[in-house]
Image (cartoon, rainbow, N blue to C red):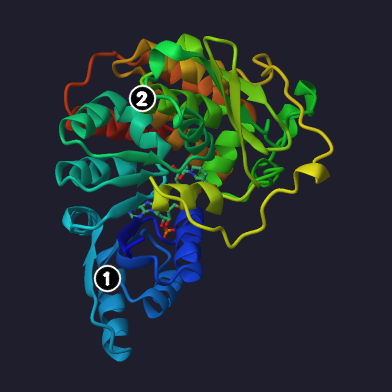
C-alpha cells in the first residue's frame, strides 16, 4: 500500500488523537499534511513537533501567532492559519483522505468544501450528516467523493454490507447497538440527581465530552440512526437500535432471506479509524484483538423510551426531514453546552429540546448556508436566554 497523505480536522480531540496514534504505529503508511485544532495549543504544539505537518490551523488568531513563533523557534516549516479560513485552506489542499473529527456543526462547512474539492473523507463528525445530510450526500454523489464512516456502528454496517452487490432492496433491517450509557440501570426517580461528572463517565468507551453526554441521554444513538439513513440510503423503518452493554457487536444486518451478519471488534476506536484510513484495503493490526472464547456473554435488549425519550425524538426529527434534524441537533449541542456549565439539569435536556423543536417555524433548507443559519439562530437564542 502506498503512503497515504492525510489531513485531520479536530486533531486534538479523542478521535484526532487516536488517528495520530495510528500514524505513530504505521509511520510508513500515512503522511500527515494538515492538522486543525480548536483551542488546545499545548497538545497541538507537541503534535507539530512529532508529525511535522505542512499546514496547521487553530481557531483563534492569537494562538496562530503563538504557533508561528513556536515554529520559528523549533525550525519547523509549517504554514499557520486560523479560524474558518484556516479550515478552508486545509480542506482545499489535495490529500488522499481528510479525517473529519471536529465535534458538532462546526464540521459542516469544512466537509462541504472538501467534497467540492473532491477530497475523500473519513467522517467521524456525525452532526454533519444529521444537520445537512441531504445536501452533503447529494454533493458527494455528484462529485463522486467517498464518505467513509468512522463511527464504529457505521464502519461495522459498511463491513457487513461489503459482500453484497446491491444494498437497500435486500436489507430487512440494520441494527445499531448502543451501550445504554452510564444510566441504563438507574431508576428514573434518581435521574434528578444526575450530575455532569456522572454523565461523563461512559461505561465502555472513552470519548469527548459532547458525545459522552449524548450517550448518557441516548441522543447519540438517535443521531447515529439519522447518520445511517443518509450513509446507506436506507429508510428509517429498517433502522433499529439494540442495547448491547458489552459494546463488542457494533452493527447487525439482517437480509431478506433471513441471513444475518454481525460485526464484532474490541471496544477501541482505533479499529474503525483504521478501517476508514485504509479503506478499501486492510492491513495487519498492531492492537489487541478480541479473544472470542473469553467473551462470557453478549446481551441484547430493547431500548427504553420512557426513561430515554430523546432517542425517539431524535429519530422522529430525522423522519420529518427539512429543518427538523438541524434544529434538533443545534438545540442539543447548545443545551449540552449549558449542562456541562451546570446551567441546567439532566432532565431539562429533554424538555428544552422538545420545546425548541415545537416552537421553531420549520421549512425546507435549500443550501448549506440555510442549515448554518438555522444552527446559528437556535444556538444564539438558547445561549443568550438561558
Ligand atoms: N470519541 C469517540 O470515540 C467518537 C466515536 C464515534 C464518533 N465520534 C464523533 O467524532 C466527532 C469528534 O468527537 P470527539 O469525541 O473526538 O470530540 P472531542 O474530543 O471533543 O474533540 C473535538 C475536536 O474538535 C476540535 N474543534 C472543535 N471546534 C473546532 C473548530 N471550530 N475548529 C477547529 N477544531 C475544532 C477540538 O479542538 P480543541 O480540543 O483543540 O478545542 C477537538 O480537536 C464527534 O462528532 C463525535 O460524535 C467520536
Cα–Cα span, label 1 and label 2: 36 Å
Q: Nearer the viewer, residue 328 or 111?
A: 111
Q: Is the residue 76 above or below the residue 192 in the image? A: below
Q: Could you tell me if residue 244 is visible in this image?
A: yes
Q: Say the numbered circle drawn on residue 112.
A: none
Q: Is residue 266 left or right of residue 120?
A: right
Quadrant of the image occupied by residue 132: top left
The residue shown at (21%, 21%) is: 365
Q: Is residue 40 left or right of residue 91?
A: right
Helix, strand or loop at disc 2? helix
Helix, strand or loop at disc 1? helix
Within-10-Å neighbours for mark 2: few <14, some 14–19, many 20+: many
The residue shown at (48%, 17%) is: 315
Q: Closer to the observer: label 1 or label 2?
A: 2
Mark nearer the N terminus (1 vs 2):
1
Name the image quarter holding the N terminus. Answer: bottom left
Q: Nearer the viewer, residue 102 or 353?
A: 102
Q: Is residue 135 left or right of residue 169?
A: left
Q: Say the numbered circle drawn on residue 230.
A: 2
- Spot occupied by residue 211 in the image (x, y as percentages of width and height): 53, 41
The residue shown at (58%, 39%) is: 213
Q: Which residue is mark 1?
A: 64
Q: How many marks?
A: 2
The residue shown at (68%, 47%) is: 197
Q: Nearer the viewer, residue 7 or 307?
A: 7
Within-10-Å neighbours for mark 1: few <14, some 14–19, many 20+: many
Q: Is the residue 238 above or below the residue 187 in the image? A: above
- Spot occupied by residue 189 in the image (x, y as percentages of width and height): 78, 22
Quadrant of the image occupied by residue 111: top left
Amino acid at each position: 500500500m502506498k503512503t497515504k497523505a492525510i489531513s485531520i480536522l479536530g486533531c486534538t480531540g479523542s478521535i484526532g488523537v487516536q488517528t495520530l496514534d495510528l500514524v505513530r504505529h504505521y509511520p510508513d503508511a500515512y503522511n500527515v499534511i494538515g492538522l486543525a485544532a480548536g483551542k488546545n495549543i499545548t497538545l497541538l504544539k507537541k503534535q507539530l513537533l512529532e508529525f511535522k505537518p505542512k499546514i496547521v490551523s487553530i481557531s483563534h488568531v492569537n494562538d496562530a501567532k503563538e504557533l508561528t513563533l513556536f515554529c520559528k523557534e523549533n525550525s519547523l516549516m509549517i504554514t499557520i492559519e486560523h479560524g474558518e479560513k484556516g479550515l478552508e485552506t486545509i480542506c482545499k489542499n489535495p490529500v488522499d483522505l481528510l479525517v473529519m473529527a471536529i465535534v458538532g456543526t462546526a464540521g459542516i462547512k469544512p466537509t462541504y468544501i472538501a467534497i467540492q474539492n473532491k477530497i475523500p473523507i473519513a467522517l467521524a463528525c456525525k452532526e454533519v450528516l444529521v444537520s445537512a445530510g441531504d445536501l452533503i450526500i447529494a454533493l458527494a454523489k455528484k462529485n463522486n467523493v467517498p464518505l467513509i464512516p468512522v463511527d464504529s456502528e457505521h464502519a461495522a454496517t459498511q463491513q457487513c454490507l461489503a459482500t453484497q452487490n446491491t444494498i437497500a432492496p435486500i436489507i430487512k433491517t440494520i441494527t445499531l447497538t448502543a451501550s445504554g450509557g452510564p444510566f441504563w440501570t438507574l431508576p428514573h426517580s434518581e435521574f434528578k440527581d444526575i450530575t455532569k461528572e456522572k454523565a461523563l463517565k461512559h461505561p465502555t468507551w472513552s470519548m469527548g465530552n459532547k458525545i459522552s453526554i449524548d450517550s448518557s441521554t441516548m441522543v447519540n444513538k438517535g443521531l447515529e440512526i439519522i447518520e445511517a439513513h443518509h450513509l446507506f440510503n436506507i429508510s428509517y423503518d429498517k433502522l433499529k437500535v439494540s442495547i448491547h452493554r458489552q459494546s463488542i457487536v457494533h452493527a447487525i444486518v439482517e437480509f431478506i432471506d433471513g441471513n444475518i451478519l454481525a460485526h464484532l471488534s474490541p471496544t477501541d476506536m482505533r479499529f474503525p479509524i483504521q478501517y476508514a484510513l485504509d479503506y478499501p484495503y486492510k492491513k495487519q493490526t498492531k492492537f489487541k484483538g478480541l479473544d472470542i472464547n473469553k467473551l462470557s456473554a453478549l446481551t441484547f435488549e430493547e431500548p427504553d423510551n420512557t426513561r430515554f425519550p430523546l432517542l425517539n425524538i431524535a429519530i422522529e426529527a430525522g423522519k420529518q426531514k427539512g429543518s427538523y434534524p438541524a434544529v434538533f441537533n443545534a438545540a442539543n449541542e447548545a443545551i449540552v453546552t449549558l449542562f456541562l456549565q451546570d446551567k441546567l439539569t439532566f432532565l431539562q435536556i429533554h424538555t428544552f429540546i422538545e420545546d425548541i423543536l415545537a416552537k421553531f417555524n420549520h421549512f425546507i433548507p435549500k443550501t448549506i448556508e440555510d442549515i448554518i443559519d438555522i444552527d446559528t439562530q437556535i444556538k444564539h437564542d438558547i445561549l443568550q436566554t438561558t
